[in-house]
Image: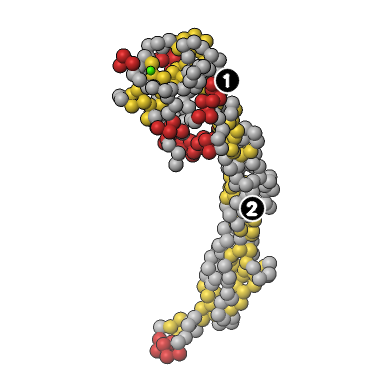
């Protein structure tokens, strides 16, 4: 991993934007100069006021990523006799990048010869010798109260960049968007759409569309008219890829369970087709010498249930109890 000071997150602590920071460090790997634009004050201020100026109008005092960035600054910023403050100062006894509060590492240092010399023991802030003849772009420690121009940077990515629907990646003086799944467009302003759903027969559909009609994160729930039941999922979701989680369900007519003709009797159903669907009715008769016990007509309701259980045909002849037991007689009255 690159040293932490390379990872500059102007708005959030590094730990909160690790992925973003990692992207920014890629600029170093790609040897890009900078991921933002530079600005400077036309008046000269103390270091503290310079920082306030930068934070008010831009992002912060510059935090330098590498030698190439220093060369770039030395090229684009004009010469000013008292030079420019940058975002390093002594904290305790350690030179620190103030934006990230990370200590200055040896490989990042760019001190002029014999600096930092801490002359008179009060040189706690750092200037950059922009366009100096003898040490262009080098650093020098100076008393913080001295007046110099503020050298600021402004990050290009803002809170609303990429419509908050993508990762904002700083480029030189601009940014690009890497859209999150489900979004597209230069600013990630568009949301992926799924096909419109046709309402299945005998079905009701209840949809929510947080981001757009039949689009990513839309959800549709289904239920069926009375006498029908769902065959398939009760809920579909539109995925980031722009397809539904599955095909829509179908509503199929509800059927009642099988009915059997009573022993010593008969059953007559209409309609007489094999499946006992909604509105089927069955009537029962018993053979000669048997009496029907229960309902003589049952119907299949819209809830898929018979209005009553199938009846039994009971014998009218009374038999001796011992005979019943020995012959395993059923459907007769035994005494
Ligand atoms: Ca000095």
Q: Quadrant of residue 250?
A: bottom right
Residue to which mark 2 is pinned? 248
Q: Quadrant of residue 310?
A: bottom right
Q: Quadrant of residue 111?
A: top left
The quarter of the picture where the C terminus appears is bottom left
**Counting residues from the N terminus, which is met first, the one under dot 2 or under dot 1?**
1
Q: Number of callouts in the render? A: 2
Q: Residue at x 37, y 11 (%)?
A: 145
The nearer-to-camera label among 2 and 1 is 1
Instruction: Give 210 or 240, whichever is nearer the viewer.
Output: 240
Q: Quadrant of ligand 1?
A: top left
Q: Position of residue 249 (x, y in %)?
A: 63, 54
Instruction: Give 277 or 157, whichever is nearer the viewer.
Output: 157
Q: Which of the numbered marks, if any, corresponds to residue 257?
A: none
Q: Secondary structure at mark 1?
A: helix
Q: Residue at x 68, y 46 (%)?
A: 195
Residue to which mark 1 is pinned? 76
Q: Residue at x 42, y 28 (%)?
A: 109
């Amino acid at each position: 991993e690159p040293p932490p000071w390379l990872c500059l997150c102007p708005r959030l602590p590094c730990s909160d934007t690790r992925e973003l920071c990692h992207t920014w460090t890629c600029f170093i790997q790609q040897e890009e100069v900078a991921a933002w634009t530079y600005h400077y004050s036309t008046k000269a201020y103390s270091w503290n006021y310079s920082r306030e100026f930068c934070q008010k109008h831009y992002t912060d005092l510059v935090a330098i990523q590498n030698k190439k960035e220093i060369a770039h600054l030395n090229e684009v910023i004009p010469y000013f006799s008292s030079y420019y403050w940058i975002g390093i100062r002594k904290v305790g006894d350690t030179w620190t990048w103030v934006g990230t509060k990370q200590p200055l590492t040896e490989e990042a240092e760019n001190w002029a010869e014999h600096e930092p010399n801490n002359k008179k023991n009060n040189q706690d802030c750092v200037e950059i010798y922009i366009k100096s003849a003898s040490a262009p772009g080098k650093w020098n420690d100076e008393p913080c109260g001295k007046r110099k121009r503020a050298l600021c940077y402004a990050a290009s990515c803002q809170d609303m960049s990429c419509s908050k629907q993508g990762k904002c990646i700083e480029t030189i003086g601009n940014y690009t968007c890497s859209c999150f799944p489900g979004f597209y467009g230069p600013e990630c302003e568009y949301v992926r759409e799924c096909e419109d759903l046709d309402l299945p027969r005998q079905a009701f559909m209840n949809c929510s569309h947080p981001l757009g009609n039949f689009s990513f994160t839309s959800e549709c729930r289904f239920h069926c008219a009375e006498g029908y039941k769902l065959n398939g999922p009760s809920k579909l979701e539109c995925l980031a890829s722009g397809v539904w989680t599955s095909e829509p369900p179908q509503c199929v007519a509800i059927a009642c369970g099988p009915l059997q003709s009573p022993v010593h009797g008969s059953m007559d159903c209409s309609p007489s087709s094999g499946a006992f669907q909604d509105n089927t009715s069955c009537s029962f008769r018993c053979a000669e010498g048997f009496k029907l016990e229960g309902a003589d007509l049952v119907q299949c309701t819209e809830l898929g249930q018979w209005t009553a259980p199938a009846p039994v045909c009971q014998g009218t002849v009374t038999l001796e109890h011992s005979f019943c037991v020995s012959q395993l007689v059923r459907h007769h009255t035994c005494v």
